[in-house]
Amino acid sequence: MNENSDVMYRLLVQGVVDYAIYMLSPQGIVSNWNAGAQRAKGYRADEIVGQHFSCFYTPEDRARGLPAQSLETARQVGRFECEGQRVRKDGTLFWTHVVIESIRDDRGHLLGFAKVTRDISEKRAHDLSLLEAKRLAESHSAEMASLSMFLDSVIANIPSSVIVQDAVSRQILLVNLQAERLFGNAREHMIGRQLEQCLAPALSSYLRRLTDQCVRTEGLHHAESQQHTPRGLRTLRSKTVTISGKALGSSYVLLIVEDITDENAAQARIRHMAHHDSLTGLPNRALFRQRLEEALREDAGRDRMTATLCLDLDNFKNVNDALGHEFGDRLLRAIARRLRDVLRANDTLARLGGDEFAVILPELKNGEDAQFSAQRLIDTIEPAFLIEGHSLCVGLSVGIALASKDQNTPEELLRCADMALYEAKRNGRHRYEFFHPRMDAVAQKRRTVENDLRQAIVDKQLHLHYQPIIDKCDTRIIGYEALIRWQHPQHGMIMPLDFIAIAEETGLIHELGALALREACHEAQRWPGELTVAVNLSPVQFRNNGLVELVQAALADSGLDAARLELEITESVLLDNNQANIGILQRLKALGVRIALDDFGTGYSSLSYLRAFAFDKIKIDKSFVHDMSDSNEAIAIIRAITGMGRSLQMQVTAEGVESDEQFMRLKAEGCSHFQGYLFGRPQPAEHRAR
């Protein structure tokens, strides 16, 4: 039994003692078994857990396919309910009332089924006995005396509460044991009296209305209501019917009352679990979709619109990783409360899973209303959350989609809001973006590239090209940078700029990175002398706990000396989960490889990076090299970087060198190594510059 099933089972059985409650897998295998089930069916848990639930059905019902039909109904519509005969362990038959509810996770995937059964053999026997007694009383008047004694015995011991009154005087003629317990009064204090004389005013008034209605209108009457009883507020399900007596003109009112409070509570728990997130108590994806469908239907044709917002937390993963999932769960609950507090009463806030939330904003006048709501949500999350002395800061990114004739289904609206959310995160996070049709075109292109890239990995369409790295002393080639290229069968050569970002978003970067490391190391092993090879690492690769082992394996498989491998990272590695990533860098350096800081000066460059980790090399981005002849700022930055390199005893490589003038100027400024078209373009291994 998985953890989700265990939690659901404990919730189901809590406080329920008179019902058989057990869980089924999606295939109908019993995974849990409570004491009520053991009492009802005779099996111990170790005898039945792991068995198919069809073992409780009669051979005839199994032949008719009833077990499979019941599960299919619960799977399709969420609930199956029936009454029927089942088989105990000892082979005896009994009647039961069965409810099967489907249980789904936050993504709508079926986890299994919750089954609540109640033995109604006594109730059914009672109902049948009453019907038979009524028939006999009307057709066999000579046997009424003996039949009355039989009825008294049956009624006295059935589990439902039974009261029989004279239809004219309304005096109580019969009260069974269950009625004594429910209504809190002894039979001897009730017989011969009217309801108002022996029960509380509110309860007697309710029962009086039932009997009055029954006397006025023939037939069987059903009712269900919550009433205050000596046992507290209880839900009562009642049946009333008039019965003709033996004497001419005599008649009686039969009142049967069942306390269904516990049964309703169990079913309510099942329904709530099926539609709400267990952590925050918010609606889950299934209920969100249902409410969105209702909002779209109600706003259709009116001068109002519905907006859907997709919400994603910024920096939540860092909090979760640093403090653990328990803090993460408490933070999610606190976030849910803040978000709920700034929404309207008719808005719906749901948790779709992880740190993703969604909001339905119905009955909006225009798009500005959605914009204001999105900004309120962003603003309410901005102040720090104080949890057990920890000040936790997260941000919020929001995607907004407005219902229109093109986006008028829950699935389409949610998909559009999700694309807008992606755009908000891509544009810097902690902001909102509205969906625009161009986003769909971009998303389609991104999906096409992703699918093609997956196939490219399988078909080995990805190859490395090598660009030479030059030493300033004698302008000899001292190594190469390995740069990945994609030779697409239809579109030709595709450059990294067009697919690396998508590989990072989809996680394919881990496969591409492993491929590049293995191929570069094997290729460099075939080079003469001490030529080095540089391989770029994506910041996303640092989320892989096995990155160090991957590099170690590439060196071991190829036989390449670790000192000949150089790993290039960008500053974003140090921005994302700083301490953890520095630890990974230290482990990599302990292998003997060299670590270079690429594109220094273009992002959030900070001297603290150079103090936090002893890089072997700093690489000046080619944009500064390109602008240095026309920009004093560019040459000043180059001069500052080379100065830091000398002071910290780090090599400095200038990228993008295309002319002798640039080469001479950069040498004069103190660069130790150079790359660029002046020395050679990236080429396949067999055509690399030598």
Image (spheres, grey):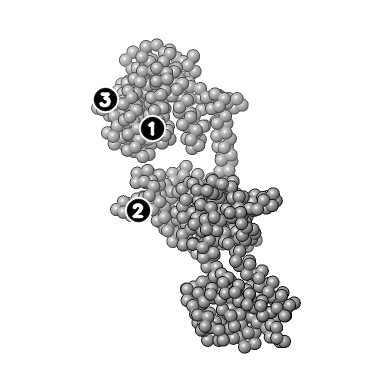
- Taking depth in this image into account, of 672 and 558 the one nearest to the observer is 558
Q: Is residue 636 above or below residue 530?
A: below
Mark 1 and mark 3 in contact (Cβ < 8 Å)? Answer: no
Residue type at mark 1? Answer: Thr
Indicate which disc residue 384 carries.
2
Query: Residue, x 56% and y 56% (percent of image)?
Result: 41
Q: Which residue is mark 1?
A: 570
Mark 3–mark 1 distance (CA, rounded to whole Å): 19 Å
| In the rendered image, the vertical position of residue 22 relative to residue 481, given as above or below | below
Drawn side of residue 178 relative to residue 429, left or right:
right
At numbered mark 1, what does the secondary structure look like: helix, strand or loop? loop
Q: Residue at x 41, y 13 (%)?
A: 527
Label 2 or label 3, whichever comes before in sequence order: 2
Q: Which residue is mark 3?
A: 649
Category of crowding for the residue at label 2, using alpha-carbon neighbours closer than 10 angstroms: few (below 14), some (14–19), many (at least 20)? few
Q: Position of residue 91 (x, y in %)?
A: 61, 54
- Asked if residue 433 shows in the view, the reply is no
Depth check, front residue: 202 or 136: 136
Kind of element beneath mark 3: loop
